[in-house]
Image (tube, coloured by chain):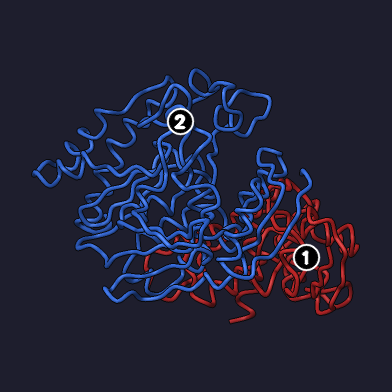
Amino acid sequence: MKTTITVNGEARALDLDPRTTLLDALREHLQLTGSKKGCDHGQCGACTVLVNGVRINSCLSLAVMHDGDEVTTIEGVGLPGQLHPLQQAFLTEDAFQCGYCTPGQICSALGMLAEVAAGEPSQETVDLAGKIALTDDELRERMSGNICRCSAYPQIVAAIKSYAKELA
Amino acid sequence: MRPFTYERATSAEAAVKSAAQHPNAKYLAGGTNLLDLMKLEIEQPSHLIDIGRLPLAGIEETSDGGLHIGASATNSAVASDPRVRARYPVLTHAIVAGGSPQLRNKATVAGNLLQRTRCAYFYDTTKPCNKRAPGSGCGALEGLNRNSAIFGASHACIATHASDMAVALVALDARVEVLTPSGQARAFPLMELHRLPTETPEQDTHLVPGELITGVTIPPPPKGGQVYRKVRDRASFSGALAAVAVAGDRLALGAVAHKPWRAAEAEAALAAGASPAEAIAKELEAASDNGRNGYKINLLSRLVPAAIDEARNGRPA
């Protein structure tokens, strides 16, 4: 089935079995292997990408559902030698061990910060009318869809906080 | 995943027409539950009708002061809507208690209502499950039933409905709008969407095959406070062991039955002047303990009065 998806700014024409997930289209058909297949059931977050700026689990979406969409993967966030400031913050804060979850963590954090900026509440948000302060509890709750089995959570929180501070 | 054909619907009318022509079709919107189950081959549709791009995602004021929420509004969009946050905080709190942000960004209102149970026997294709394989038996009845239903179960099935959002919507007296296979619109209370398992637990709802949910309507908010409380094994991204939504005088319970459970006995007792503890005790008279799920009775006898107290008197300092 013919599908065109703009991936990291470039229109990519694909001809796919409709069963192909967005994750498999990225990894197996476009050779963008930064997005990782952890659980393949939406539970680990390693496959997180941005679709039209919004973070989703690419393993729980069919590629054919995304005809005409704009997808950003970790390869579109930054490249060796031109790291995104959040990628640099992950290095500076030592926010990973094996690195398998890191592309998903970084794409998820970028989506998360946009959600906070847009005032979207989480279960940690007590005052639904107020501006959201990115406390550690808010940050951890909002990143709960990304599991790190090396348990680098304190450093991941530190990296995202240091980048968010840079932004502010 | 089994092979299937895929089409993108051009209108809601075209979608129901196509479903009528494809007996083993499923509607696809966010896909977060359906695609997961298709990978496990628990769901095996031969045709998918993608309704994700139909203009059914709007959230609009109704003439009586309520809200109309389109069926394909994402969970995140509903939870974040300023009118929902201001007038229906129980709905926002329930939605953000469910799933992960990535899932809520994709999952839709109708998909949330129609999600399948998380009973472990439904997911484990090596085990009996009358909901997945009618006639095979119920593994949970005398098995690992820690998260099973305490209300309204049958000897064929003691699975629970997994939604947080639906519990809040039931407490808010929401109505569901559907398009029938012949293209007629009809609407009915959300409380009447889901059914009890009886002898046919493979049917989660009273929808006719091919019917398409197009939206949900919420009446003006009731007088009084609104609270959603959820108890679970982890602090985040975990299904409820028990949950309660309070909206004024109305109470709904989650993770206790095959459907979001409106606590009508407790509501009646409260209206007659009973204390919150007495009221939930009245509701729990009908609860059953299957061996490992009995703790839910004690849990609710504490959780519900605490939630009612918070709705009446504000959050404890």
- Badge 2: chain ID: B
Q: Which residue is mark 2?
A: B148
Name chain A's colour.
red
Type of residue at label 2? Ser
Nearer to us in this view, A16 or B26: B26
User: Observer-nearest residue: A84 or B299?
Assistant: B299
Question: In the rendering, at what x and y percent does residue B254 appear?
Answer: 39, 43
Residue of label 1: A91
Q: Which residue is rendered at x = 79% and y = 56% of the image?
A: A18
Name the secondary structure under disc 2. loop
Image location of residue B28, percent across then percent down? 63, 57
Q: Residues within 10 Å of mark 2 (few under 14, many from 20)?
A: many
The color chain B is rendered in: blue
Q: CA distance from mark 2 to mark 1?
A: 45 Å
Q: Is residue B269 above or below residue A142?
A: above
In which quarter of the view is residue B257 placed? top left
Identify the secondary structure beneath mark 1: helix
Are circles 2 and 1 on residues that touch, CB within 8 Å?
Answer: no
Asked whether, in this view, residue A55 is left or right of residue B60, the answer is: right
Who's the residue at 60% across and 72% down the image? A113
Q: Position of residue B52 (x, y in %)?
A: 62, 65
